[in-house]
Amino acid sequence: MSYLIDVIIHTTIGIIVTVPLWAKPFLRKVLFAVFIVSSLIDIDHFISAKSIHLKDAATLRYRPYTHSITFAVIAGGITFGITKSPRIGVAVCSGIMSHVLRDASTGITFILYPMKLTKIPVWVYVMSELLIFICCLVLRKWI
Ligand SMILES: [Zn+2]
């Protein structure tokens, strides 16, 4: 049950920080992209644990390398390359970053993989989420 609540919180925060990107005709695509990446990125836990059991996925010593800002940028770039929409690329990148930063405030996460920064204080997490929101706000004029 707590896992489900965690997914709901990740998704909600991801959607909130990308509010500036909401605009027609991108609204549904941006919301869908953020919903998918914010909620489903934890699939990498199951892949890393090589198990379909939640207990195995939740008890990894550290989160997989795809739980990083590095991966967020790569995923955003790939999304942009596929969709040809910078707004959706930024939405994917922001959604993953939001998820990773929240995880990094609660446990071992290689935030800037391959660097060894693994945990951030809660105040850094909160300020980072605010920074993502501001970046979306600034970028929306150009994308
Ligand atoms: Zn996670």
Image: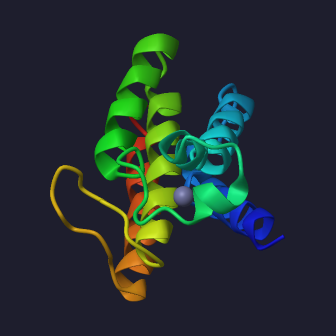
* Left or right: 64 in relation to 37: left
Residue 9 in percent (x, y) is at 70, 67
Tell me which colouring the rendered structure shows: rainbow
Image quadrant occupied by the C terminus: top left
Instruction: Say whether residue 126 is left or right of residue 32.
Output: left
Q: In this view, which residue lies farthest toward the right?
A: 1
Q: Quadrant of residue 135?
A: bottom left
Residue at the left extreme, as displayed: 115
| Tally of numbered tags | 0
Image quarter for residue 33? top right
Along the viewing direction, whichever of 87 and 56 lies nearer the viewer: 56
Q: Nearer the viewer, residue 33 or 42?
A: 42
Relative side of 110 to 142, left or right:
left
> Is residue 45 positioned above or below 23 on the image?
below
Picture quadrant of ligand 1: bottom right
Q: Position of residue 30 (x, y in %)?
A: 63, 35
Residue 77, visible in the rendered structure: yes
Residue at 39% in and 42% down: 72
Q: What is the x, y in percent for residue 139?
A: 39, 43
Q: Which residue is painted at 65% across and 54% down in the image?
A: 15
**Quadrant position of the N terminus in the picture:** bottom right
User: Which residue shows up at 47% across the image and 12% down it?
Assistant: 82
Query: Which residue is painted at 17% across and 63% down in the image?
Result: 116
Residue 5 versus residue 50: which sits nearer the camera?
50
Q: Do we see residue 16 in this rendering?
A: no
Q: Is residue 25 above or below residue 119?
A: above
Residue 137: % across, % down: 46, 53
